[in-house]
Amino acid sequence: MRVLTNCLALVIRNDANRYFDTQTPWLLKPLADDDPECKDVQVKTKRLRTVLWSTQECLRVVGILLQPVIPEACQRMLDHMGVPARERDASYARVRAVTVGDRVISDGEARKFVLFPAKK
């Protein structure tokens, strides 16, 4: 069962990575001088939130599934994402039915977190 879970986690991670790359969220972020009332800016902002939420949700599921293999790293990642400890068993390893953008990590938070720091 553990091997199957690990394989599933890797498949999900690979699909999430492909999704993130093809959606190019770095091109969706509105620029500082963009008019927030512009329809195109609103559409891009909504799409950006969807892409980031979807990617974050995949990472949450992978973090839960990989806990038996890399428990410390998964704990740090899930802590950073704000996943309650009571919601980290395998029964929570599914996409949640929540509002898109329910808890998307902000730019500032994302920059502060490194899952696997470089060895010195």
Image (spheres, helix red, strand yellow):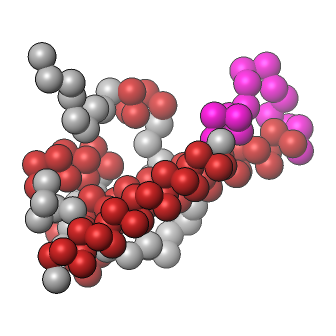
Left or right: 6 as drawn, with respect to 31: left
The kind of secondary structure the magenta stretch mainly shows is: loop
29 lies above or below 32: below
Query: How far across and how far down the image is residue 32, in percent?
Result: 72, 21
Tell me if I can see residue 62 in this picture: yes
Residue at the (25%, 53%) spot, across then down = 78
13 lies above or below 117: below
108 lies above or below 102: above
Q: Nearer the viewer, residue 17 or 38?
A: 17
Query: How far across and how far down the image is residue 1, in percent?
Result: 16, 83
Which quarter of the picture shows residue 91?
bottom left
**The furthest residue to the right:** 39
Specify the segment rendered in magenta.
25-39
Residue at the (63%, 34%) spot, across then down = 26
Residue 29 falls inside the magenta stretch: yes
Query: How far across and how far down the image is residue 118, in percent?
Result: 21, 24
